[in-house]
Image: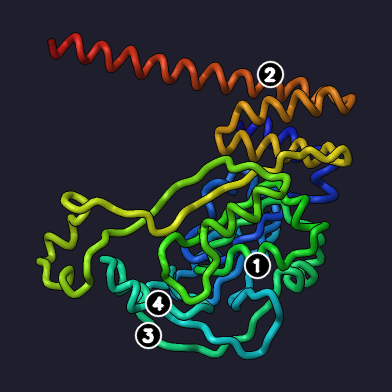
Amino acid sequence: MNKIIDQIMNLSYFKKRPPVFLDIGASGSIYKEWEPLAKYSYCIAFDADKRDFRVTTEANKKYKKIFIFNSIVKEMKSNKNDFFLANSPHCSSTLKPLNLELNNWAFADLFLTTKILKLPSITIFDALKYAKLDYIDWYKSDSQGIDLRLFKSLPSRIRDKILAVEFEPGIINAYKGEDKLYGVLSYMQHKDFWISDMKIKGSHRIDLAIFKKFSFFKKKFIDLYLTKSPGWCEISYLNSLQSSRASQREFLLLWIISTIKNQHGFALSIAEKAKDRFDDEIFTILVGVSKKYMRLSFYKLTRKIINKFYCFLKIR
């Protein structure tokens, strides 16, 4: 994979316009799916909670260029915004946690507000202007409640040309006035995107007061005896690239993104479509690579089935 990425990224399209990744809520480490492209790419990262904001040191070494904003991201710029600092840095938000409703869940303590800060905010568009960029290729947002409104705040000329979009909307009531999964689904179904992946995440439904009485051992191994219920969702979209004005750069980068996400059928479709539209040998190569990855997936599955069958015969 690295060899074909290197070949594509050394084309003139990406010398002039490197891939641009945008990460809202960048607590933790560099996004694993971006690593194959990082050395060729620009990254714009935001997180107002600095307690687990480790992107700086790690990402400076990996990205071609990175712009880091330790600030709130909102639809409109403002000098003073409430920021609810939670027990967990991954739960801090510009929205007020609904602690009474969260008390029905085992993870409620993560959302408890330790301090309310007054912080300035920046818009995505202003961050792009600061970086002297006018496009985004891969948009990833975990803003704790405002993913969709931030995405909608982008000008359509930028928003509609994004190749990959990732949200983490809520399902249960965790924050006051938050963007929910149903809102994301409703909005995105009218756009030129399709859902490439959806992972339902959650917690255990139990009154916090009861859960706190459990022993350390029972709390630690709660997954062994209580079923998790849906609480939020990690949902990914890929651009369908239906526009007749889509460029070779967009087809090439979307092929890479689709392949990274193991969407080899879609990657093959993208390469075939581009091969018919553009007179460029690179797309014939990509068709072959996608077919190769599909064969490898088939062989891996076949080997797994044969191994399981062999183990079954040995046991018998």
Name the residue nearer the viewer: 210 or 19. Answer: 210
Name the residue nearer the viewer: 188 or 155. Answer: 188
Q: Which mark is residue 263?
A: none
Residue 60 image position (x, y, % from top left): 61, 61
Which residue is identified by label 3?
A: 114
Q: Secondary structure at mark 2?
A: helix
Check the picture and name the quadrant holding the C terminus: top left
Which residue is identified by label 2?
A: 288
Residue at 67% in and 62% down: 151
Q: Which amino acid, by three-letter code, is at mark 1?
A: Leu
Q: Which amino acid, by three-letter code, is at mark 4?
A: Leu
Which residue is identified by label 1?
A: 150
- Could you tell which of marks 3 and 4 lies nearer the N-terminus? 4
Q: Which amino acid, by three-letter code, is at mark 3?
A: Thr
Residue 302 image position (x, y, % from top left): 41, 14
Q: Secondary structure at mark 4?
A: loop
Which residue is identified by label 4?
A: 98
Q: Secondary structure at mark 1?
A: helix
Left or right: 280 in relation to 223: right
Q: Which amino acid, by three-letter code, is at mark 2?
A: Gly
Residue 57 image position (x, y, % from top left): 54, 65
Q: Secondary structure at mark 3?
A: strand
- Could you tell which of marks 4 and 2 lies nearer the N-terminus? 4
- What separation in Å lies between label 3 and label 1 (alpha carbons)? 25 Å
